[in-house]
Image (cartoon, rainbow, N blue to C red):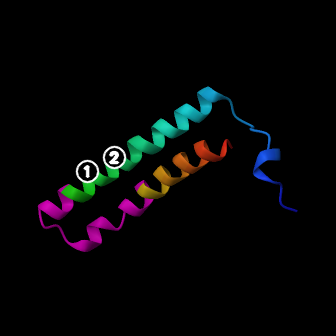
Amino acid sequence: MEIAPSNRIANIGAGGRRKRLIFGIVALAVGAVIAALLIAIGAPRVWRLPLFLVFYVAALGIFQARDKT
């Protein structure tokens, strides 16, 4: 059963959404900087694989803030 977006009730306050959004943006920036550094120094591609977790956490924070969950 799908609930229309207009009928959803947020289960997190404005402060919590702001914290999640800021955390997501910071994680995204950290991941981008680390990726750029790894590329700049010519590190093996396998070293970039753990960045998946950083970008995953960033996406969770941003999407949860956007969806108010």
Mark 1: few/some/many CA within 10 Å (<14, 14-19, 20+): few
Quarter in which the N terminus is drawn: bottom right
60 left or right, relative to 22: right
Q: What predominant SS class does the magenta segment belong to?
A: helix
Q: Nearer the viewer, residue 57 or 22?
A: 22
> Which residue in the protein does label 1 denote?
33
Residue 47 image point, x, y percent: 27, 67
Residue 60 image point, x, y percent: 55, 52
Q: Is residue 49 above or below residue 60?
A: below
Residue pushed farthest left?
Answer: 41
Residue pushed farthest front?
Answer: 6
Q: Which residues are magenta?
A: 37-54
Q: What secondary structure is found at the residue carrying circle 2?
A: helix
Q: Nearer the viewer, residue 24 or 42?
A: 24
36 left or right, relative to 10: left
Asked whether the beta carbons under mark 1 and mark 2 sit within 8 Å of each other, the answer is yes
Residue pushed farthest top?
Answer: 15
> Which residue in the protein does label 2 denote?
29
Q: Is residue 37 above or below residue 67?
A: below
